[in-house]
Image (cartoon, rainbow, N blue to C red):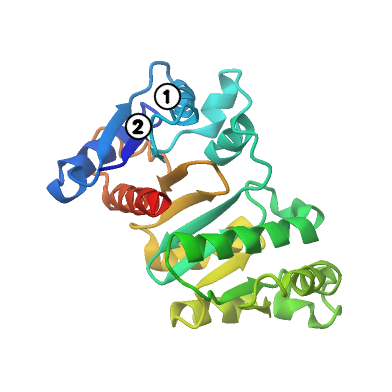
C-alpha cells in the first residue's frame, strides 16, 4: 500500500504552494503516495503545521513534507516559533532531535541549529554531539541501507584547534564525545578540519558529516545541492522532510519557482516511510 503523506504548503505569500503543485503535476511524483495537502487558513502557514501534527500524532498519516514558512512572521503573530523541527519536537515530546541535510553526495547533520555564531561554542556539548552521531548512524542504517556507516566529525576551530593553540573546544568537548561513543558507533572519524572533511565526503570517503553549526555544514552542502537539497528531521516519531529553501517572496506568484527540491523532499519522505514499514 502507498504511504499517506501530508504536505503543508507553507507561507501563503511564498513559493510553497507553487512548488507543491508543480511537483504533484509530475506523474512520477504523484503516483508515489496518497497525498493530503493542507493549505494555510491564516496569514503565516502555522495553522497548517498544527493540523498536520494532530493527524500524524493520531497515526492517520506516515509522513510530513513541509513547505517553507517565515519564522519572523509567525513570531510577530504572537506564536513563539523557532522552526518546524523545534515545534514538532515539542508537541511530540521528543527530547533528542537533529537536522540532516541530504543532497548529491552529501548527508550533513547539524549539532547546533538556529543559533547565533557567537553562541555556538557555548552551546556545543558532549551530549548533543553524541546525540547527533547516534541519530545519524541510525538513519544511515535504517533509511539509507548503509550497514556500516562512515561518519566524519567536523572540528570547530581552524585546523581543529591545533592542540589547543587556536581553540580548546576540540580538546575539551569534541574529542571526549567521540571517545565516549566510539564503542557504540564504530565508523566515526575525527575531528577533521572543515576544509578537508567535505572533500572526503564529496569523494564518497564518508557516508555523512557531523557539522558543529549551521553554515559550517550548509555552505559546502548548497554548493552542490542548491536546487535539490532536502532537510530531514531525525528523532521524531514520524517521517518529516522539507525542501531546503526559503519562502522566496521575491519570486512568489511569478511562476518562476523551481520545484526540484520539493520533488526530492517528497521522494525521500516516501522512501523513508516505506522503510519504516519493513
Vertical order, 69 against 108 (above or below): above
Which residue is labeled 2 in the image?
Answer: 9
Residue 255 visible in this rendered orientation of the protein? no
Seen from the viewer's position, the closer of residues 9 and 218 is 9
> Which residue: 29% across, 30% down?
36
Q: Which residue bears the numbered disc 1?
A: 48
* Residue ranking furthest to the front: 278
| Picture residue at 58% right of the left edge, 48% below the top | 235
Q: Tell me if I can see residue 47 in this picture.
A: yes
Helix, strand or loop under label 2? loop
Residue 148: give x, y in percent of width and height: 53, 76
Q: Position of residue 26 (x, y in %)?
A: 15, 46
Q: Residues within 10 Å of mark 2 (few under 14, many from 20)?
A: many
Report which quarter residue 117 is drawn in. bottom right
Q: In the image, 103: left or right of 253?
A: right
Does the residue at mark 1 contact the one at mark 2 (Cβ under 8 Å)? yes
89, above or below 278, in the image: above
Residue at image position (43%, 26%) is 55
- For the image shown, how many numbered marks are present on the structure? 2
| Residue nearest the viewer, comparing 118 with 42 | 42
At mark 1, the secondary structure is: helix
User: Rounded to the nearest whole Å, what is the CA distance between mark 1 and mark 2?
Assistant: 8 Å
Q: Residues within 10 Å of mark 1 (few under 14, many from 20)?
A: many
- The mark nearer the N terminus, 1 or 2, is 2
Work out whether residue 130 or residue 71 is closer to the camera in this orientation and state it. 130
Q: Specify the quadrant that holds the N terminus.
A: top left
In which quarter of the view is residue 121 placed?
A: bottom right
Amino acid at each position: 500500500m502507498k504511504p499517506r503523506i501530508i504536505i503543508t504548503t507553507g507561507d501563503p505569500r511564498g513559493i510553497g504552494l507553487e512548488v507543491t503543485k508543480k511537483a504533484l503535476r509530475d506523474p512520477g511524483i504523484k503516483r508515489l503516495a496518497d497525498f493530503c495537502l493542507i493549505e494555510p487558513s491564516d496569514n503565516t502557514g502555522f495553522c497548517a503545521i498544527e493540523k498536520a501534527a494532530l493527524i500524524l500524532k493520531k497515526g492517520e498519516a506516515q509522513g510530513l513534507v513541509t513547505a517553507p514558512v517565515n519564522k519572523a512572521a509567525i513570531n510577530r503573530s504572537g506564536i513563539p516559533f523557532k522552526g518546524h523541527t523545534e515545534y514538532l519536537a515539542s508537541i511530540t515530546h521528543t527530547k533528542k532531535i537533529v537536522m540532516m541535510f541530504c543532497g548529491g553526495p552529501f548527508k550533513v547533520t547539524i549539532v547546533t541549529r538556529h543559533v547565533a555564531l557567537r553562541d555556538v561554542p557555548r552551546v556545543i556539548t558532549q551530549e548533543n554531539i553524541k546525540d547527533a552521531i547516534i541519530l545519524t548512524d541510525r538513519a544511515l542504517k535504517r533509511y539509507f541501507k548503509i550497514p556500516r556507516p562512515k561518519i566524519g566529525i567536523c572540528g570547530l576551530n581552524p585546523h581543529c584547534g591545533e592542540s589547543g593553540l587556536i581553540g580548546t573546544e576540540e580538546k575539551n568537548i569534541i574529542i571526549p564525545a567521540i571517545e565516549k561513543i566510539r564503542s557504540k558507533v564504530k565508523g566515526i572519524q575525527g575531528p577533521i578540519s572543515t576544509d578537508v572533511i567535505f572533500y572526503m565526503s564529496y569523494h564518497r570517503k564518508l557516508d555523512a558529516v557531523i557539522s558543529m553549526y549551521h553554515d559550517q555544514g550548509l555552505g559546502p552542502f548548497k554548493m552542490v545541492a542548491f536546487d535539490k537539497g532536502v532537510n530531514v528531521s531525525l528523532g521524531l516519531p514520524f517521517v518529516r522532510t522539507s525542501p531546503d529553501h526559503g519562502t522566496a517572496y521575491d519570486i512568489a506568484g511569478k511562476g518562476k519557482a523551481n520545484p526540484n527540491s520539493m520533488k526530492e523532499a517528497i521522494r525521500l519522505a516516501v522512501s523513508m516511510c516505506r522503510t519504516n514499514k519493513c
